[in-house]
Amino acid sequence: MSAPPTTLLAAGFVAFATAAPAQPPARTDEPAPVLEFGTMQPVMDQGIFAHVIFNELEGRFNGANTEFRWEGQGWVGTDYDKLWIKSEGTFRGNTIDDGQQQFLYDRAVTTYFDLQGGLRSDLDSRPARNWAAFGIQAKIPSIQVGKICLFAALRTT
């Protein structure tokens, strides 16, 4: 009577394992890193990420009454430093009507709060108006994102 195939397979693995003795890892002259008490392992938290979302992106291009409307925001940066771009406006005919763009630098100050500062520009058919923007943004889990932003007019005469 012949041996079952599983017994032959197991015997082959045992013969292979005993024929090749285990090799110790290659020895290096560098000592292993030693962590002191109270130190933390470095983390990989400096990756650059990006996020873009549009709340409104619609247009009408047939006929004499053409219009394109957008409202969105996006950011690019690390976990701690980001460049925010927020934009909204209406493009009617050949002019921008009621447009607002913000370019903000964002710095995380705590786990749930970021400080923001930058420039807001109101672009439309009239002369453009520029504002300095300063704000704080809250990102508390299970609560909607909230923000408070102050604008100071930059006037030139």
Image (tube, helix red, strand yellow):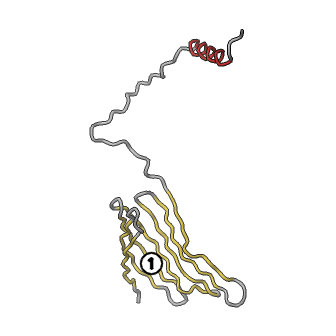
Residue situated furthest top in the rendering:
1
Residue pictured at 56% horizontal, 87% vertical: 97
Element type at mark 1: strand
Left or right: where 15 falls relative to 100: right
List x then y, in percent, for residue 58: 62, 78
The quarter of the displayed image where residue 3 is located:
top right
Q: Amino acid at mark 1?
A: Arg
For the residue pair 72 and 95, the one nearer the viewer reads as 72
For the residue pair 110 and 120, the one nearer the viewer reads as 110
Left or right: where 26 falls relative to 60: left
Left or right: where 40 falls relative to 27: left
List x then y, in percent, for residue 23: 51, 18
Residue pictured at 43% horizontal, 75% vertical: 119
The residue that disc 1 covers is 120
The quarter of the displayed image where residue 80 is located:
bottom left
Q: Is residue 145 above or below residue 7?
A: below
Give the position of the C terminus as an image quadrant.
bottom left
Give the position of the N terminus as an image quadrant.
top right
List x then y, in percent, for residue 38: 27, 41
List x then y, in percent, for residue 49: 50, 57
Residue pictured at 64% horizontal, 85% vertical: 67
Q: How many marks?
A: 1
